[in-house]
Structure formats: structure tokens, C-alpha cells
Amino acid sequence: MNELLEECTQRGLESFGHEACREACSMALDQIRGARKAGDRMAGVDDAFWTEVSGRLEILPSLKLRGAINATGVVLHTNLGRAPWAAEAIAAAAQAAGASICEIDRETGGRGRRDAPVSELLAKVTGAEAGLPVNNNAATVLLAVSALARGRKVVVARSELVEIGGSYRMPEVIEAAGAVMVGVGTTNRVHAKDYIKALEDPEVACVLRVHPSNYRIEGFTKEVGMKELADICHERGLPLVYDLGSGVLDARDLVGIEKEHPVREALQQGCDIVTFSGDKLLGGPQAGLIVGAKPLVERLRRDMLTRCIRLDKTILAALEATLSIHALGPNAALSRIPTLQRLSLTEEQIMQRATAFATQVNALGDALTAETTTCNGRVGSGASPTEDLPSAGVLIRHATRDAADLAHALRMSEPPIFSRVQDERVLLDLRTVAEEQERVIVQALSKL
Ligand SMILES: *Cc1c(COP(=O)(O)O)cnc(C)c1O
């Protein structure tokens, strides 16, 4: 590394700063190690290496969309890019970014299907007959309704007409898909007889069930069980489509999401198509994942819209890596997928980290005082919207700057750090902070 840093100086790169040079060299070295591992024995410190280093130094620091530290306590923070990827997913995406076996058959050299590996894994981890990945979950509903009910009617309970942020509203999605929505029941109550009556209309092509992701209807309520609804549909030869949203594969041992509906369970209860997001509780990249009965999934796959909402090769690679981790079982998923790992932490475990963290902050000098606290985080992104996530963190006060000013300074530091303001102090909830990021936060605080 010292030799590389010396060469950085000779090449006039030291103006970018010593730490930045070290980091760029270290990342470029990782790339060489990866290439060697993959069989490229010629990979080394050559011209390409230095192009890589100077590229990183010049371009990456100037990017607006850049990595940040999430100390908000909201595990799946939509505005901070939802799920952080597993290390394997990041490596897989980087590897696929060049020429890659994306849509070619290795055996024959002929054309292949880009979604095939992910589709197979999706079926494997959910127990479905078939799977299909597309751009995001919003697109899966558009596709499912369009492919199954274009020019016909879709039955959906009035209690499920959700609006997800950013103008995604269920009645409008159905309309955009070219189908006519038939609302059944009332805001708080829907009965089996409501569905049965609506399904007498021969124009109805499917029933859509929507997970009330970001709200709860409580009090005098009634809904039809999933299995009962599936039976009602199947007796009439109609498919039941379920927009599940969050897509939990296995909720065991996870705080705050015990009430989420696992994908496998929804399929076992008789849903013919289940759709969910890749970047919510699955813990992967942004994607919309469709699983279900083979003939229906194939119908969706053949729809023209599928080509319009297909995934990029890097995202497919990251998804393949994420699903491969899930395929190893719940323990592997808990330890390697950051979203799940964060949800598996207990308040006591986080408090232990908070105590050590507060000591480090208090050692920085008199300007900052840090105090540990218990606090409440959230799962975020429409999972368990009404449930708090018991957590722990530190409250930080500055001698001369107010909390809003301190939070602003943290957002503007490198890398940007996002916190919450509580009781006139800055709250850093450590559940959503990776352990190796704590050092970076202390460093940022030391500069304030
Ligand atoms: C989050 C969510 C969506 C939107 O999913 P994206 O992956 O963000 O497009 C749609 N439906 C439900 C029920 C959701 O929870």
C-alpha cells in the first residue's frame, strides 16, 4: 500500500487527499484479487489499475447519488434507498457489469433467457411452481392485471384500495392496466357473499387482494380468509392475485414483522399469483417478484409489458445472489442479509453498542455530550406500519449548535449521516447502523 501511495504522489493524485487515495487503491486492489480468483492470472498493478484509481478519485466523490449512513432507526428507509445489499449481491452486480452471461446459453452459444436463474430460485425459495422478476412491485400489479384482465373486470375489496407513496393508487393502477375495477364490501367490512355476488358477472377475469401495507383498519371490521377467498375463486375458475408488498420469506426470530404474511404461506392458502418487492423484507435490489402457478406466470411472461419492465443484468445478478443466500436457509439469511440481520438484533444488543459508542463520543472533547437511550425505530416501507421497533442509540448535544444544525452538519459530512431529532438533541439509532460504520460516525463528529 505504501508503494502504491507513493506512486499516487508521483502521478499527482495526492491532491485528492491521502485517505481518498488509500481507499481508491484498496478498492482497485480488491478488483484485482477478484479477477485473480476468477482465473485472470495476468491481473495486476498496470495501466488499467491506475485508470481505475484515478477514475474513482475524480468521479466518485463528485456523485450526487452516493452512499450514506442510515442512523434513523427506520430499517427500510425508502428515501435512503430501502434495503442495503448483501456483500455478495454487491460483488455479483459488479461482476455482471461488464460482458456477462446475461441472455446467452453457455452450452450452445445461442440465445438464453435473462430471467431464468432468478425465476428458478424464486420458485425454489417460495415453493411456487414458477417465478418471474420485473422492475418493481408496482409494475407486477400493472402486469398481472393487464395480462389477466385487460378489457375485463377485476374484483377488489374497498378496504384494500391502498395508496403507496408517489401516486401509486390501486384504482388508478387497475385503470391504467386497461381493466375495470369492481369494488366489493365497505371500508371496514367485506364478506364472502360480497365476493360471490360480484363473481356472478361473467366479465370478471380475476380477484385482486392487496396487502394493506401502510395502514390498518381497526374496530368493527371483517375480511374473508385467504383460503376461503381462494376457494370461492377456484370454484368459479378464476385466479386469485395477491399483491403482498413486503415479501417476507421467513419471519422467525425477527423483531417487528411477526405479523407479516410469508410468501410461501400465501401460496399454500391458494393464491395463484403472489407479487412482492425485492428491496423490502427480501433485503435485495429494487425488483418486483412474481411467483405462482406456472400457466399464469407464463402468461405474464409472454405479455408485451414484461419486455418494457425487464431488469438490468446487474440487478438480476444481485437478485440471484440475494436469493441464493435465502436458499441456504433462514440462518444464512439472518447473518448475511443486512436488512434481516438488523431486524434480528435485540434492544439489549444494540444498547451494548450504544454504551461503547457514547463513551467514544464523550471522549472527543467538551463540545459534544452523548447519552445512551432506548428508542423506537420502524421496519419501514410499508411493513408493520403501526408497530414500533424497540431499539437503542445515543442522544447527542453540542455546546453551541442546536439539534437541527447538528443534524444538518451530519448530513453534509462525508459520508452523509442521517439521524433523527428528538428532545432538542440528535438521536442516532444504532439498529440501522452497521458496526463498521460507528467508527466513521465518531470521526465525523470529531470534525464538528
Ligand atoms: C410497496 C408496495 C408496492 C410497491 O412496490 P415497489 O416495489 O415499491 O414498486 C405495491 N403494493 C404493495 C402492497 C406494497 O406494499
Image: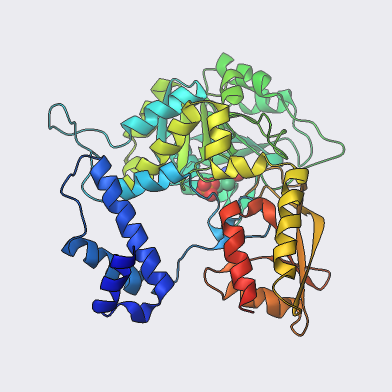
Q: What is the quadrant of the C terminus in the image?
A: bottom right
* 322 is higher (above) or lower (below) than 26: above
Q: Residue 290 at x, y = what percent?
A: 46, 33
Q: Position of residue 119 (x, y in %)?
A: 38, 30
Task: Decide if residue 139 is on the left or right side of residue 1.
Answer: right
Going by the image, does 73 lie left or right of 101?
Answer: right
* Residue 149 higher or lower than 73, as above or below: above
How is the structure coloured here? Answer: rainbow
Q: Nearer the viewer, residue 128 or 45?
A: 45
Q: Residue at x 74, y 62 (%)?
A: 358
* Residue 221 drawn at (x, y percent): 82, 35
444 to the left or right of 311: right
Q: Nearer the viewer, residue 111 or 187?
A: 111
As drawn, the residue found furthest toward the top would be 235
Q: Is residue 250 above or below residue 25?
A: above
Task: Tell whether 36 sits left or right of 371.
Answer: left
- Residue at image coords 44%, 29%: 122
The image quarter containing residue 301 is top left
Residue 200 visible from this viewpoint: no
Nearest to the observer: residue 97 or residue 298: 97
Quarter occupied by the N terminus:
bottom left
The answer to whether any part of residue 196 appears in the image is: yes
Decide: is 320 above or below 74: above
The residue at the point 76 percent across, 81 percent down is: 402
Farthest right residue in view: 219
| Total marks in image | 0
Outermost bottom residue = 400
Q: Residue furthest left?
A: 109
Q: Nearer the viewer, residue 318 or 436?
A: 436
Q: At which x and y percent is residue 322?
A: 45, 38
Q: Name the residue at 50% across, 31% down.
A: 326
